[in-house]
Amino acid sequence: MEAVRRLTPVPSEPEPQYKTAPHNIEAEQALLGAILVNNEAFYRVSDFLEPIHFYEPIHREIYEVCGKIIRAGKTATPVTAKTYLPDDLLEGVTMAQYLARLAAEATTVLNAADYGQAIYDLAIRRNLLLISEEMTDRAYNADVETSAQIQIEEAEKSLFDLAEKGRYDGGFQGFNQALIEAINMAGEAYSRDGSLSGTATGLSDLDRLMGGLQRSDLIILAARPAMGKTSLATNIAFTVAKAYKAEPLPDGHMKTVNGGIVGFFSLEMSAEQLATRVLAEQSEISSSDIRRGNIHESQYAKLVDTSNLMAQVPLYIDDTGGISIAQLAARARRLKRQKGLDLLIVDYLQLLSGSKKAGENRVQELTEITTGLKALAKELEVPIIALSQLSRQVENRDDKRPQLADLRESGSIEQDADVVMFVYRDEYYLSNKEPKEGTQEHLEWQAEMEKVHGRAEVIIAKQRHGPTGTVQLQFQANLTRFSDLARDDYLPTRQE
């Protein structure tokens, strides 16, 4: 009898498995219905929820149209909204019927914020998936010139944009959105101390000329050595941090309402040296006395009290030397994500390095650095003050006040900067020209020294959004402190 052959059954192919991107259509419908029934629901989510966060394309359109109607001061209902939306939706369902169904099934407006937060979180998750897929693809298919470090920096930038702005894409935005942001900025300036559109530096005359430090601006602060540019930068940094106040937003983020959180990249001085300068300014004890320990008991007690107050100020210092513009950007993003950031200071520009490709040519390297700083200011939406050295050609002129042509090594500094400021102290140059004592020239020199003693000029040579001019300031060298000049007859230079 022939043996019966047992055939191994061929396994049937499993049903293909696939995953859809995270979404919740019911939450989107519930929120839109609540808005159509009671427009108050829109105001509970509009601070953080944008049309792009909706998964269903038609829901994006409905939300956007409702927003436009409400912002125009009108009432968004199924009747008013359908005018601005396509008539046909699905086979057998018109837009008017769908809007009416959304409104009819709407629940209380009290849940609107919860629905909005759920929609927002799911949109973030979808973008996280997109970023992870792009990271994987780039890791597998990277070209020779793209190092792993560059890929990490690109991924970090993508994650930062997603965390801060709730979206991962560039492209165009409607002019209506830009107008809303402009009106909001004007409203904030109206309600802020001093009616400034930007962050106050604490120097009244400088603030009056600049309107404060403007978001997304690259501000170059340049001078020859010993003029006090680092002192001015630390004065501004501490004043801004000391004035910091914030309030919570509906999405959980904190909104700065006064002052700001400051990041300070000190590429030349150590964090301890920088802290000593600020301590001297705040305690009114000479920095040289602090370093040498030449202080009495009451001054030491004052130093301790001052340092305890300073310890609570949101001023963060990175004193790593020789970092690249890419490393600086990555650390600044991390600071903003972890602590917050409203002002970034870099001391100083020429100590940064660019990529290896630009490293052979210093002009190209500096162009890459200034372009990178301007792009970072726009990305983080904070002002960046970058200190810069001036060329020695200043010393060869009779009038040693700096000019734009004195910026060292590259015209890109002037080109990329929104504001260029120079610090100048006539006292420094005059003190080096002391004539022989007992002569007429010495008497004249003394008279000139009295006029310029303790005075400094901040020359605004370029300001993209405002006038240029010169601001006179008081400078106390022993305390490394700049302050407003106490003169009744003084007014800063103005241009109509």
Image (cartoon, grey):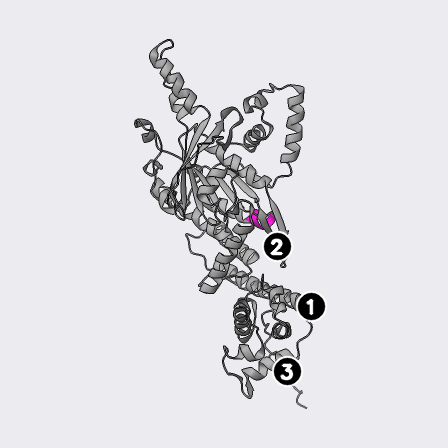
Residue, disc 1: 110
Q: Is residue 109 above or below residue 426?
A: below
Sort mark 2 into few (<14), some (14-19) or many (20+) by Cα contacts within 10 Å. few
Residue, disc 3: 9
- Which label number is shown at residue 472? none
- Give residue 197's position: percent from left, percent from top: 50, 49
Q: Mark 1 and mark 2: span between their CA atoms? A: 21 Å
Magenta segment, which residues? 334-338
Q: Mark 2 and mark 3: span between their CA atoms? A: 60 Å
Q: Earlier in the sequence, mark 1 or mark 3?
A: 3
Of 233 and 267, which appears nearest the observer? 233
Q: Earlier in the sequence, mark 2 or mark 3?
A: 3
Q: Residue drawn at (62%, 59%), measured in percent from left and top?
A: 251
At label 2, the amino acid type is His
Nearest-to-viewer mark from 1 and 3: 1
- Mark yes or no: residue 268 visible: no
Sort mark 1 into few (<14), some (14-19) or many (20+) by Cα contacts within 10 Å. few
Residue, disc 2: 253
Q: In which quadrant of the rendered image does the N terminus lie? A: bottom right
